[in-house]
Amino acid sequence: MSYVGTVVRGIKAPIIKRGDNLVDIVFDSIVSASENEGFKIENKDVVCITEAIVARAQNNYANVNQIAKDIKNKFDGETVGLILPILSRNRFSMLLKGISMGCKKLVIQLSYPGDEVGNKLVSIDELDKYGINPYSDSFTETQFRKYFPNTVHTFTGVDYINFYKEIAGNNTEVVLSNNPRFILEYTDQVLVANIHERFRTKKILVEAGARKVYTLDEVLSQSVDNSGYHPTYGVLGSNIATEDSVKLFPRDSQYLVDEIQKKFMDKYNKTVEVMIYGDGAFKDPVGGIWELADPVVSPFFTKGLVGTPNEIKLKYMADTKIKDLSGEAAQEAMKKIILEKKNNLVGVDDSLGTTPRRLTDLLGSLADLTSGSGDKGTPIVFIKGYFDNYAS
């Protein structure tokens, strides 16, 4: 019996530059780590590659002028409404700068008490104090400030209302509402900036009579003046790169994960799964921030990572089916249950309490927590034993 389950390693790599051959870099980095640290390459090991180095290697960048030109091409009025953006310097400040450059007046509609991914302007307790209903009550900035003069973010120390107004320039107005239709009191041309509810938001606006509605995944869905682009996600999933540019989400990268998998098969005769990951999908219980600011956790992955876990709950088994056994007898009984489990445990009591999430979301979250977002220098994560179980 093996005494070790899942092992996760952050793999250091060279500093990735535009145009680098990521297939060779990722493969060589893991091989070098394997030889140096003494671990083997085996079937069902998982290689996770952060989206940042993939997009950088493909040179998938855009500047604020290119964003502005696309906005000008899409909207033809004096005023554009920008609704429900997340509160983030990294994720949204450069997008906002480009968007504001592309129109004569911008009305920014912020959600409250926080944004879609949990960044708070105010606490829900403060809303209760004043009897404010976030589902029905809408405000101008002046009205909102009468109740909440201080909207400084707890972790970043930034007042995002003021910060976004400074970026967007003088001809900018901020309103606060969770009702998408509220923006139509100011303009009938709207850019939808939320991420995971964008299609519903657009549908609501179109049905309410908006003349033009676009979502962020439609901005730079094609190249503008030789910019980077993303045909599916546009500028969603982008990050600030410089003081006037963003790095977009990686595109056209199925070949990358498939080629890396092939190199491991050619050298080791092992099927190693490979995926590209962005933000993990988890929530901070203290700050309330839901990490997933990317449109998906994993945009590209090998076919062995399709699906969800098919696991039984050991704790449930221990308290029910083998509750009268102990020691070696309990171990052997548990192994037998695992080896004989059904291929599909959906709705079966034996799986009560297991995590009903996609494998790529689980693995991407694990990889994101391992690589971090700072100076660890491990943009590649190597996971062993994830598909093992107690009977392995």
Image (spheres, rainbow, N blue to C red):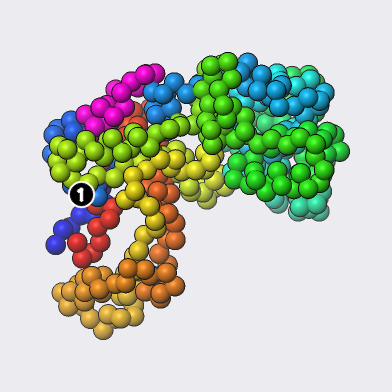
* The quadrant where residue 259 appears: top left
Rendered-image quadrant of the N terminus: bottom left
262 or 92, which lies in front? Answer: 262
Quarter of the rendering occupied by the C terminus: bottom left
Residue at 20% across, 49% down: 43
The quarter of the displayed image where residue 275 is located? top left
At x 20% / y 65%, what residue is drawn?
391
Residue at 80%, 39% (x, y): give it.
210
Relative image position of residue 279 (x, y in whole percent):
47, 40
The answer to whether any part of residue 78 appears in the image is: yes
User: What's under tag 1, amino acid-wise?
Assistant: Asn
Residue 14 is covered by the magenta coloring: yes
Q: Left or right: where does residue 167 sit relative to residue 173?
A: left
In magenta segment, residue 87: no
Drawn side of residue 198 relative to residue 333, left or right = right
Using the rendered view, name the quadrant where residue 321 is placed. bottom left
Query: Could you say where residue 297 lies in the image, as x and y percent from the top left?
Result: 46, 43
Establish if 106 lies above or below 281. above
| Residue at the image point whose x is 71% and y is 47% from the top | 203
Q: Is residue 122 left or right of residue 4?
A: right
Q: Position of residue 248 (x, y in %)?
A: 51, 28
Q: Name the residue furthest bottom.
A: 324
- Magenta range: 13-30
Does 321 sit above or below residue 83? below
